[in-house]
Amino acid sequence: MLSRTAENLYWLARYVERAEYLARTIDATLRVTALPAAYIGKTNEWDSALLTAGVAASFYQTYEEANEHNVVDYLSFSASNPSSIRNCIEAARLNSRSVRTALTSEMWDTINSAWIELQEVWSKGTSTREELAKFLRFVQETSLRFDGSAYRTMLRNDAYWFSRLGLHLERADNTARILDVKYHVLLPEEEHVGGPLDFYQWSSILRSVSALTAYHWVYRETLKPWLIADLLILNDTLPRSLASCYGNLVRNLDQIGVAYGRQGPAQRHARGIRNRLEHSNMNDIFQHGVHEFIQEFIADNSRLGEIVTKQYLI
Amino acid sequence: MAVAFDEMNIPGGDLRPAYQELARWLKETPPEALEYRRQEAELLFRRIGITFAVYGEAESTERLIPFDVIPRIMSGKEWALLEKGLKQRVRALNMFLRDIYHGRDILRAEVVPDDLIFQNPVFRPEMNGQQVPHDVYVHIAGIDIVRIDAEDFIVLEDNARTPSGVSYMLENREIMMRLFPDLFARHRVAPVERYPDELLSALRSVAPQGASGEPTVALLTPGVYNSAYYEHSFLADKLGIELVEGRDLIIKNNEVFMRTTEGLKRVDVIYRRVDDDFIDPLTFRPDSVLGVPGLMSAYAAGNITLANAVGTGIADDKAIYSYMPDIVKFYLGEEPILKNVPTWRCREPKDLAYVLDNLGELVVKEVHGSGGYGMLIGPAATKATIEAFREKLKREPEGFIAQPTLALSTCPTCTASGLAPRHVDLRPFVLTGSKSTTIVPGGLTRVALKEGSLVVNSSQGGGTKDTWILDE
């Protein structure tokens, strides 16, 4: 297939995944900030929402204060934030238009309808919490519909695999970013284990990767920080964990390699990361330093993006 | 202006035969049902994303072309005559182009004046002596046809460069079949859906000699911001070929390749929807980023076929248009089946004087204009507009031609106040391959939705209709 087509499919999936992740982040932050101050401590949750989205620096060029109004606006509707939900959907639609021939009609319909709704219903943003909740649901449903229609209607060929590569790379990046910003509340330090403060922080992390229920099913335990870290990093049954993303990335890259009759640096690099995750346990990671581990992962993951681009997309 | 010829109603109350079943159906169908279907059609167009862009509009860069649900109907007999005329016309266009870029018999015979060719910016000296496979220059032609009475078909304009609109012909039919299955059951409408297949075989048939048995065809688009982008992606999809942009192609050893995830892949035929000017920055406009550097050398080396060929603009130029009846006679020795609109060439002093004296009654067009831009419709213009145009005309008479205001035929059309006659034209698409010239029965009917308006261009408030040719 055309390299440009593969590139568009890859980014299309990334944009949709990113939009959903932003919606989840906002949703989770709204829940935490709705609690009385005694339960969440003095940290500014809106500030950390900006950090997990990776846009704190650009935010402060426009706004003075990270409060609900400003952050929701910046992450959801801002035209000047290149990765706002609005811009993600706009970019997804533009990408879809340039690769229409590689999309199934169901996928196109999902993106095009979302784009139409964005313009007709959400062009002025939201003014109440209720509207905002509706908007966030709309974004998450768009992503589910897109993902579902790709899964159910695409031919299992390189077009599908490149689209999945984008999805899993973006997803791994998002999960790692949450961990990067929140790692300190996951540290097993004696001083504040089990306080109400942490409980809500932890459940908020799980919520933002839709893993709160999953946690209970997997561990049958109350919320414990090291188990949360284990779930998000090493447990490959959780679709948003780093291990699961890398299982999928390795599989998709192998499928491409087989179809093209050639392996390359992307396959090797992905396998290297997957092996590291497979051979780690939480004890080692905590000893090595969670923060360092996550930061290394983020760098490795974005390196994979560069290698894939160089090997296939240009 | 005389009362226009109506394609459904005969003055005095009778109906033309092709419309009798439709008229019965319209009587049975309540107007709300039609309105409901119209809205449904609009929704479908929006969801499928059948949009076009209007240049120079900052807001709403994508717009829908209004779709009128009342079909335009022609009898098989009428179509047979039109089809014959179209094939004749396109054959002559191809022979004219072959001649202009080779022996130039027609210039020596003084049928067409030299300077109209050599001083014309759309004449491409790069094409002199260049062989194109099977001498086909215009693989895809869109000939704009109007009617003013029951007998004649008149060519308003030949489009021999990158004519667009065929996706509307195909999508209009799809949508009509979805919305009005019983209306189709009551008619025998000739199908149009084989157009993509015929286009692909025509394109494959003109592959260069060095191409493999299964030549690779690609569609070259200027990209998503082009007004006809939807059509490009639609056609690539239906043909099962890659939709490429200039940056996807690269020239090596005078061969054309596309960049794929598996490396470079050779391309043999390019169905290009990029104008000559932009197709190769090394040969034409150096600032073009839409083209492929070196494409013209690969073309000259005979390693790639471009459809349509470079330089076809010289055949559909409005200044050449007025010579078309003579061109048909010159090459084919036949009387032209399709008529021309009488045309005054403002470059000729006698004609200019007439035009200046009668601006209020005439339509004046720029020789190099298209899309209905830059033209004067005398009867509809204000005095000030006419005077401004008069100055322009005097300054550069060779840039214009003038024609009488034609009373284009009308068809029943849905309007805010019920069905009413509106002016229409027709663009059939003529395909020429190595062996044959084919035309899918029908074409794109464009309709001027404003009462009394004669401008059918989509960029200026025109709409479209499904066009039915009855198989009798």
Image (cartoon, coloured by chain):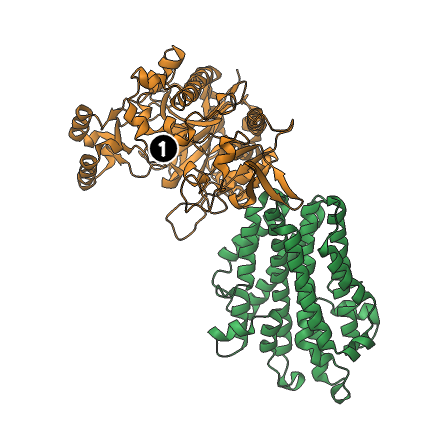
Chain colours: A green, B orange
Q: Is residue A258 visible?
A: yes
| Residue at the far top in the pictured view | B333
Residue A154 in the figure: left or right of residue A12: right
Q: Establish if B53 lies above or below A195.
A: above
Tell which subunit mark 1 falls on: B
* Label 1 SS: loop
Residue B68 in the figure: left or right of residue A210: left
Q: Establish if A248 lies above or below B312.
A: below
- CA neighbours of label 1 inside 10 A, class few (<14), some (14 to 19), many (20+): some
| Residue at the far front in the pictured view | B253
Q: For the N terminus of chain A, which image quadrant?
A: top right
Q: Establish if B77 lies above or below A76.
A: above
Residue A34 in the figure: left or right of residue B369: right
Q: Position of residue B222 (x, y in %)?
A: 48, 43
* Identity of the residue drawn at 67% across and 72% down: A178
Q: Quadrant of residue A226?
A: bottom right
* Identity of the residue drawn at 69% across and 72% down: A295
Q: Position of residue B289 (x, y in %)?
A: 46, 47
Q: Position of residue B247 (x, y in %)?
A: 53, 46
* Identity of the residue drawn at 68% across and 49% down: A150
What is the count of numbered marks?
Answer: 1
| Residue at the far bottom in the pictured view | A191
What residue did someone put label 1 on?
B122
Q: Position of residue B140 (x, y in %)?
A: 48, 28
Tell me the kind of residue under disc 1.
Answer: Val
Along the line of sight, which residue is nearer the eye, A6 or B52? A6
Along the line of sight, which residue is nearer the eye, B294 or B274? B294
Q: Is residue B12 visible?
A: no
Q: Establish if B115 lies above or below A17.
A: above
